[in-house]
Each structure stands twice: as C-alpha cells, then as structure tokens.
Image: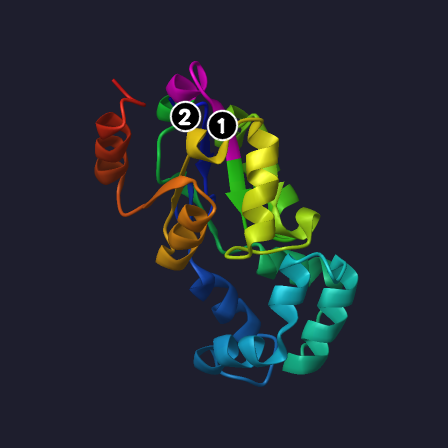
Amino acid sequence: MFKALLFDLGGVVISFDFQNAYAAIEAVCPHPAAEIPQRIRATGLLDKFECGLLDPEEFFHQFSAALDLRITFDQFRDIWSSIFLTHPLVPASLLARLRTRYRLIALSNTNALHFPLVRRSHPILDNFDAFVLSYEVKAMKPSPVIYQAAIATAGCRAEECFFTDDIPAYVEAARTQGIDAVQFISLQQLESDLKSRRILD
C-alpha cells in the first residue's frame, strides 16, 4: 500500500523552457545563444549551485565572469528565472485529489534562485506537504542521498513511495532505492500508471 507520492517539479508539474533564458543572456553577453548551454556546462557551476555549494550571489559573479555578462544581480535573477512557463503539466485538481489520501512530496533538482520564485508564482505547489530540494540536502538526483532524504521526509518505507520524473536516469535511481518509480511522459500516461497501482480510482 502506498503512503507517499513523490513528484519531480520541472518537466512533471511545472513546464519550463531554457531557451527563454539563453535568448535573454545572448542579449547581454558576447556569445550566441546556441553556444551558451555548452559554456554553462563547461563551468560546472550549475551543479555546484543546485547542490547548495554556492549562494546566489556567488553563482551570479562566477557565472557572469564565465560568460562575460555585464548586468546587475537583479537583472540576472530575472533572466535566470525566465525559463518557467505558467501552464502546469498536471492539473492542481489532480494533486488536490491525491493529497486527500497520500502525503505529497516534491523531489527536485533546483537552486536558491529558482525555487523561491516558483514557490511564489505557481500556487499549484500549495498542494504539496513537503519539498525535498537538491540545494537544501546538498545532493542532486541521481545521488542516493536525495532519495533517502525523500524517503525520510515521507515517513514510510521506500516501497510505500511512488515517484515520477521525466528523466529516465532519475527514475532508475529511485528504483535502486526501493521506490516504485515511472517516467513521466504525459498526463494521460501518469493517470494510467496511478490507476494501475490503485492510487487513483
């Protein structure tokens, strides 16, 4: 019997598009938008930021130096958070319905700039009982540490947890911790998986 449902946020509950940020960064740096993702990956800064090893201003200064940005921190914060779209991928009504029977936990790789903004701008997150966030637990999916933190937050056994994520490697990592996990592909698919487990009527 399931007691807790774990949801990834970006790509499962909240839709996003990094191209919005890349286009905005292109306007304030000498590099074309097509090169920006590779340049960001090469720095390793994002993983450090999402593991809570850099605070927002440290991340901003190092990121700006790497991409030759000439903007203020406030401008950067707005650009960096422009990836999020307003339309959710799952309806709030579904989460509210599930919450009447299960503990709902968000399990997300995120950072200290993105999450506070998303928390304020997306009221759908009010349906969650708790949040297990990479920058707070100092570990990112697919590290076992973040899944163990989620199980502890759920307050039940791993096999009593259901998890969905759009990244296959993160789904598989959850399974190695004993969690029943499925890849999120669409709302229809998710509802089907929930019904097959008798989580949803």
Residue at 63% across / 58% down in the picture? 50
The quadrant in which residue 94 appears is top left
Residues tagged 2 and 1 counted as in contact (Cβ below 8 A): yes
Camera-near label (2 vs 1) is: 1
Q: Position of residue 62 (x, y in %)?
A: 73, 74
Q: Which residue is mark 1?
A: 104
Q: Is residue 30 above or below residue 183?
A: below
Mark closest to the chain's N terminus, 2 or 1: 2
Quadrant, the N terminus: top left
The three-letter amino acid code for the residue at tag 1 is: Leu
Q: CA distance from mark 2 to mark 1?
A: 8 Å
Residue at 24% across / 26% down in the picture? 195
* Mark 2 burial class by Cα count in 10 Å: few <14, some 14-19, many 20+: some
| Element class at badge 1 | strand
| Magenta-drawn segment | 96-105
The three-letter amino acid code for the residue at tag 2 is: Leu
Q: Does the magenta segment cover residue 159?
A: no
Residue at 58% across / 43% down in the picture? 148
Apparent side of residue 198 relative to residue 31 in the rendered image (left or right): left
Q: Which residue is mark 2?
A: 95
Q: Position of residue 98 (x, y in %)?
A: 39, 21
| Element class at badge 2 | helix
